[in-house]
Image (cartoon, grey):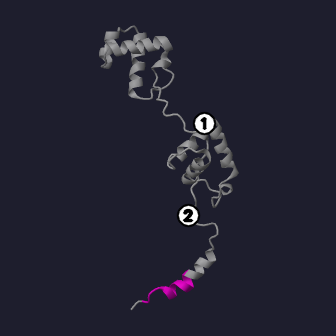
Amino acid sequence: MKPTTSSPKDWREGRRLRAWELKQQGWKQRAIAQALGVSEGAVSQWMRRADDGGIDALHHVPPPGAQSKLKPYQKLALCDMLLVGAEAFGFRGEVWTGPRLAALIRQYLGVSYHSDYIPRLLKRWGWSVQKPSRQAQQRDEEAIARWRTQTWPQLKKKPN
């Protein structure tokens, strides 16, 4: 008996792989079904899958999901737009955020995505979403300190 090459992704996959191992040891389908708490029909289906496609046919295959709204040429165009930069498209600052990209995709490619989905889309392509910093780059620390020490005390209510 050869052990499985990878660990199961979930308990169902583990059960199918264990059934295959028991079958390799010479167990009958009825005994396998009883040992694993499944029907003989289930074991029969698993063994047929393994006979047709090998042990890999017993592994979990996630569903493919919905088709992408963007066509391959649109994805390339979007990557080019990202490289050009946010300011080239009228945004203030060179930061790409989810809402900015959603607006860009809608305006230039005619496809609507929710801004919360954009990070997942970009991550799949190897990009990362940027979050704007909380403080402006033009922030003048000296002017702020001066205001706090000179202006604020004059504006603050005096204690009675």
Residue found at the very far bottom of the displayed protein? 160
Could you say where residue 150 lies in the image, as x and y percent from the top left?
56, 86
Q: State the residue at coordinates (40%, 20%).
A: 16
Q: State the residue at coordinates (55%, 38%).
A: 69
Could you say where residue 100 lies in the image, as x and y percent from the top left?
58, 54
Depth check, mark 2 against mark 1: the one in front is: 1
Where does label 1 land, which residue? 71
User: Is residue 89 in view?
Assistant: yes
User: 29 or 77: nearer the eye?
Assistant: 77
Q: State the residue at coordinates (51%, 88%).
A: 154
User: Based on the displayed image, in which of its 4 quarters is residue 79 positioned?
Assistant: top right
User: 129 or 107: nearer the eye?
Assistant: 107
Lateral position of residue 31 relative to residue 89, left or right: left
Where does label 2 land, which residue? 134
Q: Main secondary structure of the magenta part?
A: helix
Could you say where residue 5 lies in the image, as x and y percent from the top left?
51, 22
Query: Which stretch did the figure color magenta?
Result: 148-158
